[in-house]
Image (cartoon, grey):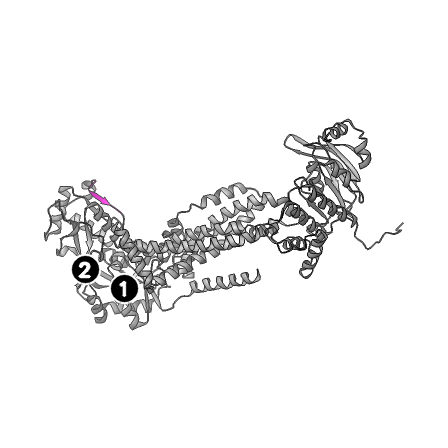
Amino acid sequence: MTDGVDMRAPLSLLPLRLDEVEFGVGSRHIIRGISTTLEAGPRTVILGPNGAGKSVLLRLCHGLLEPTGGTITWNSPELQGGPRRQAMVFQRPVLLRRTVLGNVMYALKLAGVPRWQRKERAREALSKVGLDVQADHAARVLSGGEQQRLALARVWALRPEILFLDEPTASLDPGATHEIENVILALHAAGTKIVLVTHNLGQAHRLGDEILFLHQGQLVERAPADRFLKHPVSPEAASFLEGELPW
Amino acid sequence: MVITRRVFLVLLLALAGGVAQAQDRYITVASTTSTEQSGLFGYILPIFQQKAGIQVRVVALGTGQALDLARRGDADVAFVHAKAAEEKFLAEGHGVKRFPVMYNDFVLIGPKGDPAKIAGGKDILDALKKIQAAQAPFVSRGDKSGTHMAELDLWKAAGIDLDKAKGPWYRDTGQGMGPALNTAASMNAYLLADRGTWLAFKNRGDLAILVEGDKRLFNQYGVMLVNPDKHPTVKKDLGQAFVDWLVSPEGQKAIADYKIGGEQLFFPNAGQAGA
Amino acid sequence: MNTLTDATAQALRLVATADPNLTGIVLLSLRISLAAVVFGCLIGLPLGAAIAVNDFRGRRAVIVILNGLMGLPSVVVGLAVYLLLSRAGPLGVWGILFTPAAMVIAQTILITPTIAALSRQIVADAWQEYREQLRSLGETRLGAATTLLWDLRFTLVTIVLAGFGRAASEVGAVMIVGGNIDGVTRVMTTTIALETSKGDLPLALGLGFILLSIVLVLNAGAYVVKETAQRRYG
């Protein structure tokens, strides 16, 4: 029964179970009754038209918002006040007025990493995203793509079990987008679960293993990426894909 | 970052330390603005400090405020010029004993144009009556000070009921001697001032001394040690040393030696009966 | 016009001869106001940041009161502190009335609301921007307040200067709690008030020029430091 399971390792955060999750502000229902499970392993991409509730769903999962109905249950929840085992990257990276290295070290400090280890782990993370040269530059004078890479370096240093990304490349050019996507793939290969919200169908295709399609606050369809993008089952998904295609 | 933090702490200690240091041998004397502005203290206090090694810190306010300060125990010695108020102070038990120290005099200042025609007169009551009759602008200190109380006494002595006679000609400013002089200079008004402040005053405009020398204009100073029985924090030995020095031949000489433009301002009279 | 030229001449003469009386007064003024700024920041900056990042009942009322206290008249503060420190008052045993310490206390009370109210506004605005990311990284409210204060350090410099300006220029409070005692608690502003009331207007104005120049130089210095550092860190 305990075949291959290391009883000394801490239990994983995942799977994450959403049970009839609702979220409303005043009289507006943004998320209506979503039930699903996020498993460790596949890269999950959340798609949907504007106002479908994708960003809100992401924040509900990450804990930045509290659901107004239903439950969100982690397999083994994070300890209160302990180092975070989840991370999130936003569309516009939020960086402190410090050096590139300093920003990563700050994240390591919050994660409880002892002082003498921080610099080295920070440098390691910076090299994983190709920012070694800029380590002593001011973070805020970097280009958009570099800043987003720095946000991902922060994630690298923390090695979270799950990473939420809210349209991370929406403001970047194709070159920078490509770099970011490579980092995300590398993170996944190293063991981090990816949950990504994007508008970019090409990106969904490149990065997604499975697609969650949201429409007006409800989970309308869920399928492996290939099948969804080529043969969507629901009419909402079909018309969405049609609308999103450039031709 | 670590270096800046250290510098900051050192700076903080230096500021706090410097500011908190205090000299132990000092007394607080509540006196009046007119006395301070005459420059008397600047002259006699260094002499006293040299001799006794005691620093005298003068807080200068109007007479009423000065006595109130002493009543709260915030001063060790009161040195003012309003005999009635001083005796009330003693009667209340706030002071130990009153010693007369010196006197100076008041002068009636007015515009050289002199609309009330009082210049050169020797009778202050007569002058005041003329000013009221002419409704000429008159500036009063109105601040419970010794000068203010002297002024009110003179109006009463002249038979003028200020409450009835008050009009736009009587300007009650609620200010110290200097500011009141400024006001009088700018509106060419009459006012009663102590000679010391007048001599030191530079912004005279069109004003000059018009009436002086009337005995009723003499201004007697008294000094009192604040009662240590009522106010235990009073520095009674140091305070008494100052009181003793003021009425001693040395202190009295120092007072007489103080001059502005060769003119003596204060006339020592310690020990004069009834002063 | 004569008064102005006379005033300028007096000011220049005092500075050129490094008049020792004036030097002592200037140094005392600076020490008192700088001490007040230091204490004002130690209290006001954390207070402002704490109000900005925490939600609590009555928060809006606290903000309104804090903003209102920026307009505290200095004489009122002086009077209140005098009544506290007077021998007849509750803190009379400290015996610090008519000493520079009392003046520091009064000025600190005067400028802390300004420092707190303005830093609250700045931190609150930044909190909107940083909030989600900081929470995502696992930052506590206390940690966020500290991190934001440091991150906003360049903007906060301006607030600190505002506090210093108010402290250095006020006369009502220090006159009452200090007593304007020659050689002990006489500062630039009370000296100017004294010379004015003695009718020596050119000297008063000259001293005013000197005070203004000192404050301007300090502001210029702080500005340069801020600009250089800001260019480095964005």
On screen, residue C182 versus residue B251, left or right, reads: right
| Distance from the alpha carbon under mark 1 to that under mark 2 | 17 Å
* Mark sitting earlier along the chain (1/2): 1
Q: Residues within 10 Å of mark 1 (few under 14, many from 20)?
A: few
The mark closer to the camera, 1 or 2, is 1
Q: Is residue C18 above or below residue A43?
A: below
Q: Is residue B130 left or right of residue B56?
A: left
Q: Is residue B169 magenta?
A: yes
Q: Which residues are magenta?
A: B168-173
Mark 2 lies on residue = B104
Q: Does residue B97 show up? A: no
Q: Residue at x 23, y 61 (%)?
A: B222
* Viewer-side residue, C80 vs B42: B42
Element assignment for label 2: strand
Residue C41 falls within the magenta-colored stretch: no
Residue C196: image location, x then y, percent: 28, 53
Q: Which mark is residue B42?
A: 1
Q: Quadrant of residue B224?
A: bottom left
